Image: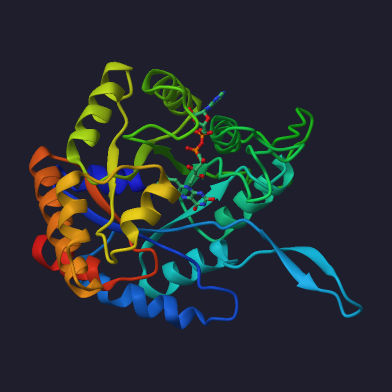
Amino acid sequence: MKVTEHLARAKGKTLFSFEVLPPRKGETIQNLFNNIEPLLEFKPPFIDVTYHREEFVLRERPGGGFTRRAVRKRPGTVAICAAIKNRFDVDTVPHLICGGFSREETENALIDLHFLGIDNVLALRGDPVKTEPHFQPHPEGHAYADGLIAQIAALNAGRYHDHDENFQPEGTDAWASDFCIGTAGYPEKHFEAPNHGSDMRYLKRKIDAGADYIVTQMFFDNEEFFKFEKRCREAGITVPIIPGLKPLTTKSQLTTLPRSFYLSIPEALAEAVSQCRDNESARAIGIEWCLNQSRELMAHGVPCLHYYSMGKAESIRRIAKELF
Ligand code: FAD
Protein backbone atom coordinates (compact mmCIF):
# COMPACT_ATOMS: atom_id res chain seq x y z
CA MET A 1 0.00 0.00 0.00
CA LYS A 2 1.09 3.57 -0.64
CA VAL A 3 2.50 5.81 2.10
CA THR A 4 -0.17 8.41 1.28
CA GLU A 5 -2.91 5.78 1.69
CA HIS A 6 -1.53 4.85 5.12
CA LEU A 7 -1.55 8.53 6.10
CA ALA A 8 -5.11 9.02 4.87
CA ARG A 9 -6.33 5.90 6.71
CA ALA A 10 -4.80 7.12 9.99
CA LYS A 11 -7.41 9.92 10.02
CA GLY A 12 -5.29 12.43 11.91
CA LYS A 13 -3.53 9.96 14.23
CA THR A 14 0.28 10.31 14.07
CA LEU A 15 1.91 7.19 12.61
CA PHE A 16 5.32 5.73 13.49
CA SER A 17 7.88 4.82 10.83
CA PHE A 18 11.62 4.45 10.58
CA GLU A 19 14.54 4.09 8.20
CA VAL A 20 17.08 1.27 8.07
CA LEU A 21 20.37 0.82 6.27
CA PRO A 22 21.21 -2.31 4.25
CA PRO A 23 23.74 -4.50 6.11
CA ARG A 24 27.39 -3.97 5.27
CA LYS A 25 28.68 -6.34 2.61
CA GLY A 26 29.61 -9.56 4.43
CA GLU A 27 26.96 -9.21 7.17
CA THR A 28 23.82 -11.33 7.12
CA ILE A 29 20.33 -9.92 6.60
CA GLN A 30 19.49 -11.42 10.00
CA ASN A 31 21.42 -8.51 11.59
CA LEU A 32 18.95 -6.17 9.95
CA PHE A 33 15.92 -8.24 10.91
CA ASN A 34 17.15 -8.23 14.51
CA ASN A 35 17.06 -4.42 14.42
CA ILE A 36 13.60 -4.28 12.88
CA GLU A 37 11.88 -6.89 15.07
CA PRO A 38 11.91 -4.88 18.36
CA LEU A 39 10.17 -1.99 16.55
CA LEU A 40 7.32 -3.98 15.00
CA GLU A 41 5.14 -3.84 18.13
CA PHE A 42 4.65 -0.11 17.39
CA LYS A 43 3.00 -1.02 14.07
CA PRO A 44 5.05 0.91 11.51
CA PRO A 45 2.95 1.03 8.32
CA PHE A 46 6.12 1.44 6.26
CA ILE A 47 9.88 1.13 6.63
CA ASP A 48 12.39 3.04 4.49
CA VAL A 49 15.55 1.36 3.20
CA THR A 50 18.41 3.66 2.19
CA TYR A 51 20.46 3.39 -1.01
CA HIS A 52 24.25 3.55 -0.92
CA ARG A 53 26.42 4.39 -3.88
CA GLU A 54 29.84 3.01 -4.57
CA GLU A 55 32.78 4.43 -2.64
CA PHE A 56 36.29 4.54 -3.98
CA VAL A 57 38.87 2.54 -2.04
CA LEU A 58 42.58 2.03 -2.59
CA ARG A 59 43.63 -1.62 -2.98
CA GLU A 60 47.25 -2.76 -2.90
CA ARG A 61 48.47 -4.26 -6.19
CA PRO A 62 50.32 -7.60 -5.90
CA GLY A 63 53.30 -6.13 -7.74
CA GLY A 64 53.36 -2.95 -5.63
CA GLY A 65 51.46 0.31 -5.77
CA PHE A 66 47.72 0.84 -5.46
CA THR A 67 44.66 0.72 -7.65
CA ARG A 68 41.47 2.65 -7.06
CA ARG A 69 38.37 0.49 -6.98
CA ALA A 70 34.71 1.34 -6.71
CA VAL A 71 33.04 -0.70 -3.97
CA ARG A 72 29.45 -0.64 -2.77
CA LYS A 73 29.66 -1.28 0.94
CA ARG A 74 25.90 -1.58 1.51
CA PRO A 75 24.31 -3.15 -1.56
CA GLY A 76 20.91 -4.83 -1.71
CA THR A 77 18.29 -2.07 -1.22
CA VAL A 78 15.70 -3.53 -3.61
CA ALA A 79 16.07 -7.12 -2.39
CA ILE A 80 15.94 -5.98 1.25
CA CYS A 81 12.68 -4.12 0.63
CA ALA A 82 11.15 -7.28 -0.81
CA ALA A 83 12.55 -9.41 2.03
CA ILE A 84 11.14 -7.08 4.74
CA LYS A 85 7.75 -6.97 3.02
CA ASN A 86 7.59 -10.76 2.72
CA ARG A 87 8.84 -11.52 6.19
CA PHE A 88 7.00 -8.89 8.24
CA ASP A 89 4.12 -7.92 5.94
CA VAL A 90 5.06 -4.24 6.27
CA ASP A 91 5.23 -1.88 3.30
CA THR A 92 8.66 -0.66 2.33
CA VAL A 93 10.04 2.50 0.78
CA PRO A 94 13.25 1.94 -1.17
CA HIS A 95 15.37 5.02 -1.66
CA LEU A 96 16.33 5.54 -5.28
CA ILE A 97 19.00 8.06 -6.29
CA CYS A 98 20.04 9.81 -9.49
CA GLY A 99 23.80 9.37 -8.85
CA GLY A 100 25.34 6.54 -10.87
CA PHE A 101 22.10 5.68 -12.71
CA SER A 102 21.23 6.18 -16.37
CA ARG A 103 17.54 6.62 -17.19
CA GLU A 104 17.53 3.06 -18.53
CA GLU A 105 18.97 1.67 -15.26
CA THR A 106 16.48 3.71 -13.24
CA GLU A 107 13.66 2.30 -15.30
CA ASN A 108 14.91 -1.26 -14.83
CA ALA A 109 15.10 -0.71 -11.05
CA LEU A 110 11.52 0.60 -11.09
CA ILE A 111 10.34 -2.40 -13.10
CA ASP A 112 11.99 -4.71 -10.53
CA LEU A 113 10.21 -2.84 -7.72
CA HIS A 114 6.87 -2.99 -9.50
CA PHE A 115 7.19 -6.74 -10.09
CA LEU A 116 8.10 -7.22 -6.42
CA GLY A 117 4.86 -5.48 -5.39
CA ILE A 118 6.55 -2.43 -3.87
CA ASP A 119 4.32 0.64 -4.10
CA ASN A 120 6.58 3.43 -2.83
CA VAL A 121 9.85 5.11 -3.77
CA LEU A 122 11.74 7.95 -2.09
CA ALA A 123 13.32 9.77 -5.04
CA LEU A 124 16.62 11.51 -4.28
CA ARG A 125 19.53 13.04 -6.10
CA GLY A 126 22.25 11.57 -3.87
CA ASP A 127 25.39 13.26 -2.62
CA PRO A 128 28.62 13.74 -4.54
CA VAL A 129 30.97 10.77 -4.13
CA LYS A 130 34.10 11.58 -2.12
CA THR A 131 36.26 12.10 -5.21
CA GLU A 132 33.86 14.68 -6.72
CA PRO A 133 33.90 18.35 -5.70
CA HIS A 134 30.29 18.64 -6.96
CA PHE A 135 27.60 16.11 -7.73
CA GLN A 136 28.22 14.64 -11.20
CA PRO A 137 25.14 13.09 -12.79
CA HIS A 138 25.41 9.99 -14.94
CA PRO A 139 25.76 11.22 -18.56
CA GLU A 140 22.40 9.63 -19.37
CA GLY A 141 20.81 10.19 -15.98
CA HIS A 142 19.27 13.00 -13.96
CA ALA A 143 21.10 15.99 -12.51
CA TYR A 144 18.42 16.68 -9.87
CA ALA A 145 15.70 14.76 -8.09
CA ASP A 146 12.93 16.55 -10.03
CA GLY A 147 14.05 14.72 -13.21
CA LEU A 148 13.92 11.36 -11.43
CA ILE A 149 10.47 12.17 -10.01
CA ALA A 150 9.26 13.13 -13.49
CA GLN A 151 10.57 9.82 -14.85
CA ILE A 152 8.72 7.82 -12.18
CA ALA A 153 5.53 9.83 -12.77
CA ALA A 154 5.85 9.23 -16.53
CA LEU A 155 6.26 5.51 -15.96
CA ASN A 156 3.14 5.55 -13.76
CA ALA A 157 1.38 7.01 -16.79
CA GLY A 158 2.70 4.16 -18.95
CA ARG A 159 5.51 6.08 -20.65
CA TYR A 160 8.92 4.44 -20.78
CA HIS A 161 11.96 6.72 -20.91
CA ASP A 162 12.42 5.83 -24.60
CA HIS A 163 8.68 5.83 -25.17
CA ASP A 164 7.64 4.49 -28.56
CA GLU A 165 4.16 5.62 -29.58
CA ASN A 166 3.86 2.63 -31.94
CA PHE A 167 4.66 -0.03 -29.34
CA GLN A 168 1.62 -2.04 -28.29
CA PRO A 169 2.08 -4.51 -25.44
CA GLU A 170 0.95 -8.04 -26.27
CA GLY A 171 -2.11 -9.41 -24.52
CA THR A 172 -4.50 -7.38 -22.44
CA ASP A 173 -2.27 -6.49 -19.51
CA ALA A 174 -0.54 -3.20 -20.16
CA TRP A 175 1.95 -1.62 -17.79
CA ALA A 176 0.35 -0.55 -14.51
CA SER A 177 2.83 0.85 -12.00
CA ASP A 178 1.41 3.42 -9.62
CA PHE A 179 4.29 4.34 -7.34
CA CYS A 180 3.71 6.74 -4.50
CA ILE A 181 6.68 9.12 -4.75
CA GLY A 182 8.36 10.67 -1.74
CA THR A 183 10.84 13.53 -1.87
CA ALA A 184 13.35 15.05 0.57
CA GLY A 185 12.90 18.43 2.27
CA TYR A 186 15.40 20.34 4.40
CA PRO A 187 14.12 22.46 7.30
CA GLU A 188 17.57 24.05 7.63
CA LYS A 189 17.87 24.17 3.77
CA HIS A 190 19.95 21.90 1.58
CA PHE A 191 23.65 22.62 1.97
CA GLU A 192 24.13 23.65 -1.68
CA ALA A 193 21.14 26.00 -1.78
CA PRO A 194 22.14 29.67 -1.57
CA ASN A 195 19.07 30.49 0.53
CA HIS A 196 15.74 29.13 1.78
CA GLY A 197 13.82 30.80 -1.07
CA SER A 198 15.73 29.01 -3.81
CA ASP A 199 15.58 25.67 -1.96
CA MET A 200 11.80 26.07 -1.63
CA ARG A 201 11.35 26.88 -5.32
CA TYR A 202 13.11 23.64 -6.23
CA LEU A 203 11.13 21.69 -3.65
CA LYS A 204 7.93 23.03 -5.25
CA ARG A 205 9.29 21.92 -8.62
CA LYS A 206 9.68 18.36 -7.27
CA ILE A 207 6.07 18.39 -6.06
CA ASP A 208 4.90 19.71 -9.43
CA ALA A 209 6.89 16.93 -11.13
CA GLY A 210 4.81 14.36 -9.24
CA ALA A 211 6.04 13.88 -5.64
CA ASP A 212 3.22 12.84 -3.31
CA TYR A 213 4.76 13.60 0.07
CA ILE A 214 7.84 15.12 1.73
CA VAL A 215 10.03 13.56 4.39
CA THR A 216 12.49 15.90 6.04
CA GLN A 217 16.12 15.75 6.92
CA MET A 218 16.63 15.31 10.66
CA PHE A 219 16.48 18.44 12.83
CA PHE A 220 16.85 19.04 16.56
CA ASP A 221 14.90 22.27 16.91
CA ASN A 222 11.18 21.99 16.15
CA GLU A 223 11.04 25.69 15.33
CA GLU A 224 13.06 24.88 12.18
CA PHE A 225 10.38 22.38 11.17
CA PHE A 226 7.49 24.75 11.88
CA LYS A 227 9.13 27.51 9.81
CA PHE A 228 9.84 25.03 7.00
CA GLU A 229 6.25 23.79 6.99
CA LYS A 230 5.01 27.40 6.85
CA ARG A 231 7.31 28.17 3.89
CA CYS A 232 6.02 25.05 2.11
CA ARG A 233 2.38 26.00 2.58
CA GLU A 234 3.07 29.61 1.50
CA ALA A 235 4.74 28.24 -1.64
CA GLY A 236 1.55 26.33 -2.48
CA ILE A 237 2.81 22.89 -1.42
CA THR A 238 -0.15 20.92 -0.07
CA VAL A 239 1.25 17.36 0.17
CA PRO A 240 1.82 15.72 3.59
CA ILE A 241 5.10 16.65 5.30
CA ILE A 242 6.66 13.97 7.51
CA PRO A 243 9.31 15.15 9.99
CA GLY A 244 12.48 13.06 10.27
CA LEU A 245 13.98 12.69 13.76
CA LYS A 246 17.04 11.13 15.25
CA PRO A 247 17.91 10.73 18.92
CA LEU A 248 21.55 11.58 19.64
CA THR A 249 23.25 8.40 20.85
CA THR A 250 26.91 9.33 21.32
CA LYS A 251 28.90 12.37 22.37
CA SER A 252 30.80 12.38 19.08
CA GLN A 253 27.56 12.93 17.13
CA LEU A 254 27.69 16.53 18.35
CA THR A 255 30.27 17.05 15.61
CA THR A 256 29.66 14.19 13.15
CA LEU A 257 25.96 14.93 12.53
CA PRO A 258 26.46 18.64 11.70
CA ARG A 259 29.42 17.68 9.46
CA SER A 260 27.55 14.93 7.59
CA PHE A 261 24.07 16.42 7.41
CA TYR A 262 24.68 20.19 7.53
CA LEU A 263 22.36 20.75 10.47
CA SER A 264 22.64 22.59 13.74
CA ILE A 265 22.27 21.30 17.28
CA PRO A 266 20.61 23.69 19.73
CA GLU A 267 22.83 25.11 22.43
CA ALA A 268 20.91 23.54 25.32
CA LEU A 269 21.24 20.03 23.84
CA ALA A 270 24.88 20.48 22.82
CA GLU A 271 25.78 21.85 26.25
CA ALA A 272 24.05 19.01 28.12
CA VAL A 273 25.61 16.29 25.95
CA SER A 274 29.10 17.77 26.03
CA GLN A 275 29.03 17.65 29.84
CA CYS A 276 28.23 13.92 29.87
CA ARG A 277 30.97 11.67 31.15
CA ASP A 278 30.07 8.76 28.85
CA ASN A 279 27.90 7.77 25.92
CA GLU A 280 25.38 6.09 28.22
CA SER A 281 24.40 9.42 29.78
CA ALA A 282 24.61 11.19 26.39
CA ARG A 283 22.14 8.62 25.02
CA ALA A 284 19.71 9.25 27.89
CA ILE A 285 19.75 12.99 27.13
CA GLY A 286 19.36 12.31 23.40
CA ILE A 287 16.30 10.13 24.02
CA GLU A 288 14.70 12.69 26.35
CA TRP A 289 15.28 15.50 23.83
CA CYS A 290 13.85 13.45 20.96
CA LEU A 291 10.85 12.45 23.09
CA ASN A 292 10.07 16.10 23.79
CA GLN A 293 10.45 16.95 20.10
CA SER A 294 8.14 14.03 19.19
CA ARG A 295 5.47 15.03 21.71
CA GLU A 296 5.40 18.61 20.47
CA LEU A 297 5.22 17.51 16.82
CA MET A 298 2.39 15.08 17.60
CA ALA A 299 0.47 17.84 19.38
CA HIS A 300 1.07 19.98 16.29
CA GLY A 301 -0.67 17.25 14.24
CA VAL A 302 2.10 15.85 12.01
CA PRO A 303 0.87 12.81 10.04
CA CYS A 304 3.79 10.56 10.93
CA LEU A 305 7.05 10.63 12.90
CA HIS A 306 9.89 9.09 10.90
CA TYR A 307 12.97 8.01 12.85
CA TYR A 308 16.49 7.58 11.50
CA SER A 309 17.80 4.40 13.08
CA MET A 310 21.28 4.54 11.50
CA GLY A 311 21.54 0.83 12.26
CA LYS A 312 20.56 1.06 15.95
CA ALA A 313 17.03 0.36 17.14
CA GLU A 314 17.30 0.60 20.94
CA SER A 315 16.87 4.36 21.42
CA ILE A 316 14.01 4.45 18.94
CA ARG A 317 12.33 1.54 20.73
CA ARG A 318 12.49 3.44 24.02
CA ILE A 319 10.95 6.53 22.40
CA ALA A 320 8.24 4.56 20.58
CA LYS A 321 7.31 2.75 23.80
CA GLU A 322 6.37 6.10 25.36
CA LEU A 323 4.44 7.40 22.37
CA PHE A 324 2.85 4.70 20.19
P1 FAD B 1 17.59 17.79 -5.09
O1 FAD B 1 16.17 18.00 -4.76
O2 FAD B 1 17.95 17.49 -6.50
O3 FAD B 1 18.37 19.11 -4.61
C1 FAD B 1 19.79 19.20 -4.60
C2 FAD B 1 20.20 20.68 -4.59
O4 FAD B 1 19.95 21.27 -5.87
C3 FAD B 1 19.44 21.55 -3.60
O5 FAD B 1 20.33 22.55 -3.15
C4 FAD B 1 18.31 22.16 -4.40
O6 FAD B 1 17.90 23.42 -3.90
C5 FAD B 1 18.94 22.28 -5.80
N1 FAD B 1 18.04 21.96 -6.90
C6 FAD B 1 17.03 21.07 -6.91
N2 FAD B 1 16.49 20.97 -8.12
C7 FAD B 1 17.17 21.82 -8.93
C8 FAD B 1 17.08 22.17 -10.31
N3 FAD B 1 16.17 21.62 -11.11
N4 FAD B 1 17.98 23.08 -10.81
C9 FAD B 1 18.92 23.65 -10.02
N5 FAD B 1 19.03 23.36 -8.68
C10 FAD B 1 18.17 22.46 -8.15
N6 FAD B 1 21.31 9.96 -0.05
C11 FAD B 1 21.66 8.72 -0.51
O7 FAD B 1 22.67 8.61 -1.22
N7 FAD B 1 20.93 7.62 -0.20
C12 FAD B 1 19.81 7.68 0.56
O8 FAD B 1 19.18 6.66 0.82
C13 FAD B 1 19.40 8.95 1.06
N8 FAD B 1 18.28 9.08 1.80
C14 FAD B 1 17.87 10.33 2.19
C15 FAD B 1 16.65 10.46 2.89
C16 FAD B 1 16.20 11.72 3.29
C17 FAD B 1 14.89 11.84 4.02
C18 FAD B 1 16.99 12.88 3.03
C19 FAD B 1 16.54 14.23 3.51
C20 FAD B 1 18.20 12.75 2.35
C21 FAD B 1 18.64 11.49 1.92
N9 FAD B 1 19.82 11.33 1.19
C22 FAD B 1 20.20 10.09 0.71
C23 FAD B 1 20.71 12.47 0.96
C24 FAD B 1 20.38 13.23 -0.36
O9 FAD B 1 20.65 12.39 -1.46
C25 FAD B 1 21.27 14.46 -0.39
O10 FAD B 1 20.87 15.37 0.60
C26 FAD B 1 21.44 15.15 -1.73
O11 FAD B 1 22.53 16.07 -1.62
C27 FAD B 1 20.22 15.94 -2.20
O12 FAD B 1 19.20 15.11 -2.56
P2 FAD B 1 17.77 15.74 -2.99
O13 FAD B 1 16.97 14.63 -3.51
O14 FAD B 1 17.23 16.56 -1.90
O15 FAD B 1 18.26 16.68 -4.21
Query: In which quarter of the view is residue 252 placed?
Result: bottom left
Q: Is 69 rendered above or below residue 262?
A: below
Q: Which residue is pictured at 30% across the width and 24% down the height?
A: 232
Query: In which quarter of the view is residue 46 placed?
Result: bottom left
Residue closest to the eye, 299 or 211: 299
Using residue 90 as the reference point, say whether residue 96 is left or right of it: right
Residue closest to the eye, 272 or 164: 272
Tell me residue 134's x, y (percent). 63, 37
Tell me residue 262's x, y (percent). 40, 42
Location of the C terminus (image quadrant) = bottom left
Q: Which residue is pictured at 27% across the width and 17% down the height?
A: 234
Query: In which quarter of the view is residue 250 placed?
Result: bottom left
Residue closest to the eye, 222 or 323: 222
Tell me residue 31's x, y (percent). 43, 80
Tell me residue 24's x, y (percent). 54, 73
Q: Which residue is pictured at 18% across the width and 34% down the height?
A: 223
Counting labels gives: 0
Q: How is the image coloured?
A: rainbow
Residue closest to the eye, 244 or 175: 244
Using residue 241 as the reference point, say whether residue 156 is left or right of it: right
Q: Which residue is pictured at 31% across the width and 77% down the height?
A: 37
Using residue 190 as the reference point, say whether residue 291 is left or right of it: left
